[in-house]
Image (cartoon, rainbow, N blue to C red):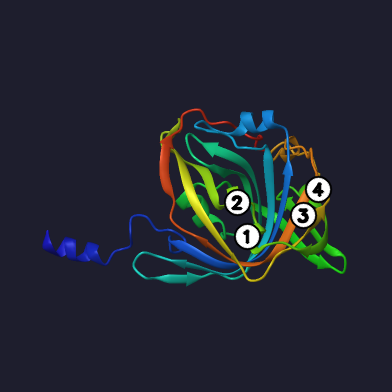
Amino acid sequence: MTPRRAAAATAMPAFAPLFAAGTESVRVRWLSLVYETDGEVLDAILPAPLGPGGRPQVAVWIAEFIGAEFSAADGTKEVRPAYMQGGISVRCRHDGGSDGAYAVGTYVEGLNHGILGRELFGLPKKQARRVRLDETPDGIEYSITNAAGIDLVAGRVALGGARPATELVPEWFSTHYTLKLIPSAEGTGFDVSRLVRIPFAFESEHSPRSGSATLAHQPCRSDPLELLTVTSEVRAAYGFARLDIDYGTYLDHVTDIPTFGSPAW
């Protein structure tokens, strides 16, 4: 047995992630778009024990992730090249807790950049054809284009003055919830079906610029974000910040899993 054990000590691990699984620290060029929507829709897509928060709000975010650094528990660090990412989260509240954000969809431009978020936390990562965040003389033009070429969200931002640095994202956005789902190898159900809480910490480099925005949805069967209708002004905040994402915390086991869209290949 001794030779076999010695060989195993230098063998490849049984689980081999694509890159170091650890905490993330990254500089971001970040746009937040916050608006109110139909509360009944949030009721339908939030998995118990999550329910709607204080107001039926949606946060659309578009960001350039610059020099994302992942730090493993053993001190290993890995830095990824810059990439674009966008997402949609809705305001929610966990039983007996404060308001947070439930991730409906996260769209990553390019290959593999979103693997860790999906493996570690269960974040609903999808590859996008393009995530656009372009500065213009008058403000910003943005869009998220899925793999089928559909602009899931798109619009323009007219930037005005500055906001306090704490308002690059709404307060509830800093506590994120996702469902971590690992399908059974037998093809039925899930071996893991847990709610995860993830801390997002933002430190702005300067006071973000603020303004109003237009936001249009293009109907899509696989990503029906048009169900999150805009029922208020869309408020925008834009700036550079340091984003730190720590390890998550397992919460409840979830059996009733709402779906949002149908795959279309």
Spatial separation of the CA atoms under disc 2 and disc 4: 22 Å
Dot label at residue 143: 3
Q: Which of marks 1 and 2 is nearer the N terminus?
A: 1
Name the disc covering residue 171, or none. Answer: 2
SS at mark 4 in the image: loop
Q: Which of 77 and 41 is in front in this view?
A: 41
* Label 3 – label 1 distance at C-alpha: 24 Å
According to the picture, the residue beneath numbered tag 1 turns out to be 166
Q: In which quarter of the image is residue 86?
A: bottom right
Q: In which quarter of the image is the C terminus?
A: top right
Query: In this rendering, is residue 190 above or below 158?
Result: above
Q: How crowded is mark 4: few (under 14 residues within 10 Å), some or many (20 or more)?
A: some
Q: Disc 1 on helix, strand or loop?
A: helix
Q: Do the residues labelled 1 and 2 touch (CB within 8 Å)?
A: yes
Report the Cα–Cα distance between label 2 and label 3.
24 Å
Q: Residue 199 location in percent, x, y?
A: 49, 53
Query: Which residue position is annotated with label 4?
Result: 215
Amino acid type, callout 2: Glu
Residue 235 at least partly seen:
yes
